[in-house]
Amino acid sequence: MTTKLYYQSPYTESFSTPVTKQAKDEAGNWFVVLEGTAFYPTGGGQPHDTGNLNGISVVDVQEVDSEIRHYLESPLPDSNAVIHGEIDWNRRFDHMQQHAGQHLLSAAFEELFSYKTVSFHLGKEISTIDLAIKDLTEKEAVEVENTVNRVIRENRPIEAKWVNEQELSQYPLRKKLAVTENIRLVIVPDFDYNGCGGTHPETTGEVSTLKILSWEKQRKQIRISFVCGNRVLKQLHQKQAVLTQLTGLLNAPEQGMVEAVKRLLEQSKNQDKAIKEVKEELIQYEAKSFASQVETISGRKIIKTVFQNRPIAELQSLARSIIAEVSNVVIFLVAENEDKLQFVCARGSASDVNMKPILEKILPIINGKGGGSESFAQGGGENLLSGEELIDKLVISCSTTF
């Protein structure tokens, strides 16, 4: 069994050790097993370490059938040699900060409000925990965050120890353990006692700081997004860069940003309303113009036209406006919109043409979808023919529909 150097000292950055096995897994990926390793394998919510073995990149580390497999970018040229390994220390220490911060965060939620953590995910940029609650207040989040950062500033020790099942009764564990042997506890004295197989710094001070970013409902739980340590500085830098750009664009100081954005949104809302009113007036004018362009085809009065890049919502509005002007017509409006065709077919109140069978005939031709009533329908599909060709098929369908 591989000696787990990451447990002996999570601060180990490089090491030398013999190779005990090199092989391919069932998917054909090369991996090696070492006599001892500082590479942490994926587990317990914490991602694997990366780095290199004799300069060859380690792209994944997994514990499979009690052996720690180091998956390599390419196989080692000499699988019997003593090799030198180096882990990506920045990645490792980041994971140590986030994982320890999660312990403190979960402990604070339980200590203050008896909110239990049911899952943890250590993401590349942001980490999350899920709480077995239906809601969370701003006041509760602030109190928890303040408690965690107080414990961090106190620079308490973080202890890791191996115990047996009989010794567990000595510790006020935060949750029941899933294992009965090879039990490893991570302890922040007088604050958190928890079973864990991850890597952690030696003191809470090395977590540096913790910031809750947001929370949201996930099914019947609340998901908390947070960052610790160097990620807090990264988040601050990103947000400050955005604020700096916005202060220039909005010509407003940081403190007046909210009011400036509110004014901008209100102006945009008013402009959208004005544009909508103008479009409605134009459509009314356009409808009057089309009302004088009635054609008689196969004994039916028809208005038809093809547009380029026109939203179907406008076609619908235009069709309704036309049949309000002329009651005894059938209307076919088609739009060629990039790589798709969209159309509206409608009848005036004095017409007896049923739009549903027309829709059923046309949609298969363009691999389309649509719906509507006997008097008004719409649909769209692939650009398999021109707008004019589609209009012709709609007119033919109309002439054969009774």
Image (cartoon, grey):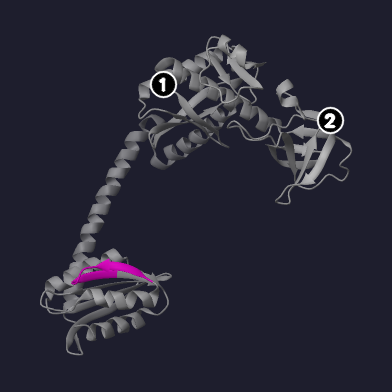
Q: Nearer the viewer, residue 245 or 139?
A: 139
Please provide percent x and percent y for residue 227: 53, 29
Q: Nearer the viewer, residue 368 or 337?
A: 368
Q: Quadrant of the C terminus?
A: bottom left
Label 2, label 1: how many angstroms apart (C-alpha)? 46 Å
Q: Which residue is mark 2?
A: 16
Secondary structure of the magenta portion, mostly? strand
2 over 367 or under it: above or below: above
For the magenta stretch, what is the residue range?
368-378
Residue 157 in view, yes or no = no
Q: Quadrant of the N terminus?
A: top right
Q: Amino acid at mark 2?
A: Ser
Q: Secondary structure at mark 1?
A: helix
Q: Which of the two discs, 2 and 1, labels the residue nearer the N terminus?
A: 2
Q: Residue at x 62, y 35 (%)?
A: 47
355 over 183 or under it: above or below: below
Q: Which residue is mark 1?
A: 142
Residue 169 in view, yes or no = yes
Residue 72 in the magenta stretch? The answer is no
Residue 373 in the magenta stretch? The answer is yes
Residue 94 as seen in the image, left or right of residue 343: right
